[in-house]
Image: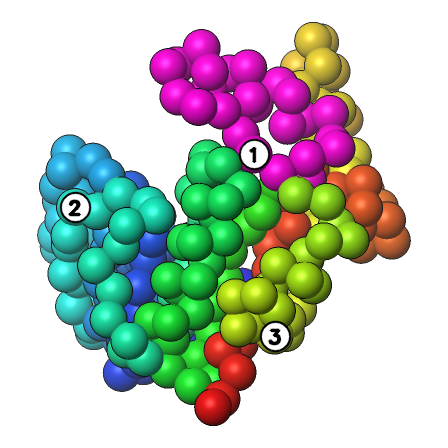
Amino acid sequence: MLDSFTAPDQLVVDIGAASGRHAIPVIQKGCDVLALDLSPEMLRKLKANSDGRSLKGRAFTVVAQLPDLPLGEACFDVAYSYATLLLLPQNEQEEAIKQIARSLKPDGIGIFDLANRYCLAIRYWDRYYRRLGMRGIFGHSYGNLPALLKRCGLEMVAIHPQGAVSQFLLAPGISKSDWVRDKVSGNGDHPGIDDYVSRAFPRLAERWYIVVRRKAD
């Protein structure tokens, strides 16, 4: 998804960059990336993972925690955040999305994922993160997404629902079957059952990957 919305010489911010799984390909493409993460250790790994690669752009790492981000006004062409916003309560998620919106240039693109508060998987992951001493997972309802984005000054470009079927792979025993996993999740060349069902019934998805644009003034 990032590849479709990034271009060489853009300034991009990765919120929750961790060890650079998403940031490094964007830097290789020729973008300058501000990589934000709460963990200094993860950012050190990002730097280590980038060593020896052919990087056309540059990485700038900053320790920062949502929802208080060191982002300026109208600075970035693209801002993205994966598996990060859903760790915040809803009010803090909204504040973080507003910060992302303000940081984008007019017509700039934002990409992030939000969890479905009514799906079964969120209960599993909520318990998992609470056992780790974190606050848990916080989701939204599908019908409330347009109003949330409007309050943040964003317009939706695309939405990619995922997990309507694959969330059931969390059930004991099911995930051990390679055949079931392949049929449900698919591979790079062929979408699985989950992709078709999630797109047909987005309200049942585990999470939504959302592409937004900052409205021009």
Local secondary structure at mark 1? loop
First along the sequence among labels 1 and 3:
1
- Where in the figure is residue 130, as x and y percent of width and height? 46, 16
Q: Residue at x 68, y 40 (%)?
A: 116
Position of residue 91 in the picture relative to residue 158 (left or right)? left
Q: How many dots with numbers?
A: 3
Residue marked by disc 3? 155
Residue mark closest to the camera, 1 vs 2 = 1
Name the residue furthest bottom: 217
Are dots 1 and 3 in contact, CB under 8 Å?
A: no
Residue marked by disc 1? 138
Tag 1: Cα neighbours inside 10 Å, few (<14), some, or many (≥20)? many
Asked if one can make out residue 202 in the rendered structure from this viewpoint, the answer is yes
Q: Residue at x 55, y 50 (%)?
A: 113
Magenta residues span 116-139
Local secondary structure at mark 3? strand
Tag 2: Cα neighbours inside 10 Å, few (<14), some, or many (≥20)? some
Q: CA distance from mark 1 to mark 2?
A: 23 Å
The amino acid beneath tag 1 is Phe
Residue mark closest to the camera, 3 vs 2 = 3
- Where in the figure is residue 146, as x and y percent of width and height? 69, 63
Position of residue 207 in the picture relative to residue 57 (left or right)? right
Local secondary structure at mark 2? strand
The amino acid beneath tag 3 is Glu
Asked if one can make out residue 5 in the rendered structure from this viewpoint, the answer is no
Closest to the observer: 15 or 215? 215
Q: CA distance from mark 1 to mark 3?
A: 22 Å
Residue marked by disc 2? 63
First along the sequence among labels 3 and 2:
2
